[in-house]
Image (cartoon, rainbow, N blue to C red):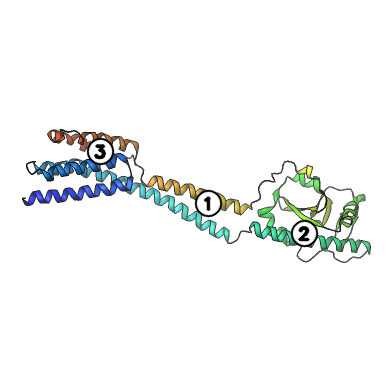
Amino acid sequence: MDERRVYILKESRTEISRLQLLSVFFEEESVYKIYLRSQVIHQLFENNEDLDIDKLELFHVQFTSSVIELLRKIKKNNEKNVSLLYDEIHLNEELMERMNNTVFTDKNFNLDKQKQALKINLSLRKLFQVLSELSTEFPFSKNINSFSSRYAKDFFYHISPDQLSQLIDFDPKDMYLDVNASIQKKLMGMLCKYDFKTEFFYGLKSGQLIIEVYKFLDTDRHFLFFPSRNLFLFCDLNVLKDVDWTTNLSEKEKIIQELSYKNDKLESSAAALKSYIPKEIIDLLEENYLKISDINFLDHLNNFDVQANILKAMLKTDLF
């Protein structure tokens, strides 16, 4: 076997190996078929020394090399676009990590609202004692406002200024008015009846103003605490009919959830984009596969000049 024949066969194997790697990367049927057909053509020349080995070289020069270059350009462009997606994913992950370090979770909230209900119940007991004894002693438990300060932004529900006004409206003649707090007389009577046993129900906010709503444990009645005025009133939930009570995630947790969902979509997009080949290119590859599958392709090898020019033209387009 002469040296030139050995050299061309070696180079042919190298080209086919490159094509094989690209067929595995893209997992596209047309690319895989071209790879298989190129192997068949190579074997034909390798097993038949009578065939003009220069035609095998011409085949790779005119066709295989252009296909490989085209696929590599697509691969490089895809990897650049995938890199942009992963940059966005990474930025989202960093943001989620920072938010996770500061977010107050449902677990924190559920634990602290029990503590807050205990503080309110103790404060109301103390307020009853203060009112009974006509004392000026401050009735509220220590740090009673810290709960709302911590959780209002993330866990309290939005209400309109009009709803807020309706909720905190009262007739002074129905109230016990103390220097430190104000409470409806009938509300205090019910609190005494049920031994000051209540639980935190919902938090509400309108702008910077907040309301804490509590529920009696043994009856379906509610009252509110308006911290900015130290005001206690029965709470008419009919005023809040249009409030969406279904969401129970904090604002930050919602953002984290949305970012996580977005990252899942970006991951899927990146996986699909990595091996994406434009339809125009697939159609061209299918057309070329049909040409090299022609049983008489050797007789028309020179016709690959036209097809090779089409492939090379594709390399200069903005399709990808």
- Crowding around mark 2 (Cα neighbors within 10 Å: few <14, some 14 to 19, many 20+) is many
- Judge whether residue 79 can be spotted in this image: yes
- Distance from disc 1 to disc 3, alpha carbons, whole Å, reads 42 Å
Closer to the eye: label 2 or 3: 2
- Dot label at residue 117: 2
Q: Which mark is first along the chain, 3 or 2?
A: 2
- Closest to the observer, 105 or 296: 296
Q: Is mark 1 on a helix, strand or loop?
A: helix
- Crowding around mark 3 (Cα neighbors within 10 Å: few <14, some 14 to 19, many 20+) is few
- Closest to the observer, 39 or 199: 39
Q: Which mark is first along the chain, 3 or 1?
A: 1
Residue drawn at (46%, 52%) of the image: 88
Q: Is mark 3 on a helix, strand or loop?
A: helix
Residue drawn at (86%, 48%) of the image: 170
Q: Name the residue under label 3.
A: 313
- Distance from disc 2 to disc 3, alpha carbons, whole Å, reads 75 Å
Q: Which amino acid, mark 2?
A: Ala
- Closest to the observer, 231 or 240: 240
